[in-house]
Image (cartoon, rainbow, N blue to C red):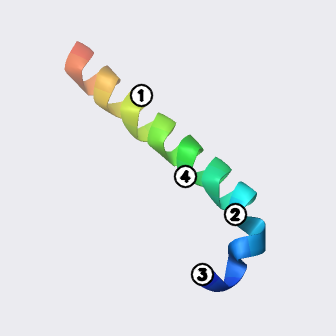
Amino acid sequence: MASRANEGTENENGEEEACDLEIRMRIEIKRR
């Protein structure tokens, strides 16, 4: 990953999306 420092923007976006998915999954589980 360190070798792809130039593509940091794509990495950050991917991580943000993954975090959102995890948060949504947890919220759905808590609602049930």
**Mark 4 surroundings: few (<14), some (14-19) or many (≥20) residues within 10 A:** few
Residue 24 x, y percent position in the rendering: 41, 28
Residue at x 46%, y 42% (from the top left corner): 19
Precedes in sequence: disc 2 or disc 3? 3
Precedes in sequence: disc 4 or disc 3? 3
Q: Which residue is mark 2?
A: 8
Pointer 2 and pointer 4: residues touching (CB < 8 Å)? no
Q: Which numbered disc covers residue 15?
A: 4
Q: In this orientation, which residue lies closer to the viewer: 16 or 30?
A: 16
Separation of residues labelled 2 and 1 (CA atoms): 24 Å
Q: In this orientation, which residue lies closer to the viewer: 31 or 5?
A: 5
Precedes in sequence: disc 1 or disc 3? 3
Q: Which residue is mark 3?
A: 2
Residue 27 x, y percent position in the rendering: 32, 22
- Disc 1 secondary structure class: helix
- The quarter of the picture where the C terminus appears is top left
**Mark 1 surroundings: few (<14), some (14-19) or many (≥20) residues within 10 A:** few
Separation of residues labelled 2 and 3 (CA atoms): 9 Å
Residue at x 60%, y 81% (from the top left corner): 2
**What amino acid is at disc 4?**
Glu
- Disc 3 secondary structure class: helix
- 2 horizontally vs 28: left or right: right
Residue placed furthest toward the right: 6
Badge nearest the viewer, 1 or 4: 4
**Mark 2 surroundings: few (<14), some (14-19) or many (≥20) residues within 10 A:** few
- 18 horizontally vs 6: left or right: left
**What amino acid is at disc 3?**
Ala
**What amino acid is at disc 2?**
Gly
- The quarter of the picture where the N terminus appears is bottom right
